Image (spheres, rainbow, N blue to C red):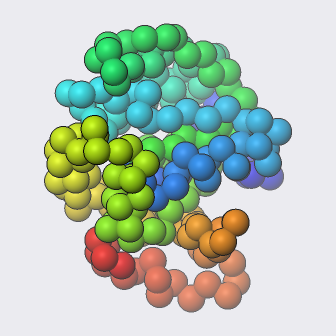
Amino acid sequence: MLALPPSVGPVRLVGIDGWAGSGKSTAADRLARELDDAPVVRLDDLADHTSPIAPAERVLAALVAPWGRGVTARFGVYDWESRRIGRRSRVPPAPVVVLEGVGAVRRALRPHLAWSVWMDVPAATARERGRLRDGPEQADFWARWVPLEREHFANDPSRAHADCLLVPWGAGYHARVRTCPEYDGSRWEEPLRESS
């Protein structure tokens, strides 16, 4: 990652996208540890009940604009329980910043990414994991979330544009990287299907 050219001011922004429940947060945390505790920004912090998928304009204004000027990004973190902005977050323009969440590799953000990852977990599997993680008290949220997420990826697919497809594999990951010499291009061209 550090060998990549900066993509936003001095920052190499790495986007990790995928269906809710696919393991984005875990992968982001593991990657950040490998990068000497690189900052991780979670798109859920920039979303809210009105816009459960953080609007691209909000992400660009809160993160990309300040880092583009080489200054610390400052933004309010949404508290999902109290339904209002809670604590304030400060993220300096570190050499690498990991951005994780649904929409991290969307069309509006791709020009600002140094590297992009799609968690290649089938939608149905990811949703089952997410529902187990969140418990029955979040059943109503999931009922509202599923069609919204489905529409988002139908209109702005990320998988076909990711540099790397990452699959949880045992205690680690199996990765297919677009720039590897053995990559033949076939898998990225498959249509996005919820069951694949």
Give the number of callouts: 0
Name the residue: 41% across, 34% down: 44
Which quadrant holds the C terminus? bottom left
Quarter of the figure with residue 172:
bottom right
Q: Is residue 116 visible?
A: yes
Reply above or below: 49 against 117: above
In the figure, is residue 59 to the left or right of 28?
left
Q: Position of residue 177 (x, y in %)?
A: 63, 72
Give the camera-side residue of 143 and 30.
143
Name the residue: 45% across, 68% down: 121
Name the residue: 67% across, 32% down: 39
Q: Position of residue 194 (x, y in %)?
A: 29, 71
Reply above or below: 181 against 63: below
Give the camera-side residue of 127 and 183.
127
Give the camera-side residue of 111 and 121.
121
Quarter of the figure with residue 158:
bottom left
Reply above or below: 104 against 8: below
Name the residue: 52% across, 55% down: 23
Q: Is residue 145 visible?
A: no
In the figure, is residue 92 to the left or right of 119?
right
Extreme front residue here? Answer: 136
Give the camera-side residue of 170 and 103.
170
Q: Position of residue 87 (x, y in %)?
A: 49, 11
Q: Position of residue 147 (x, y in %)?
A: 17, 53
In the figure, is residue 93 to the left or right of 75?
right
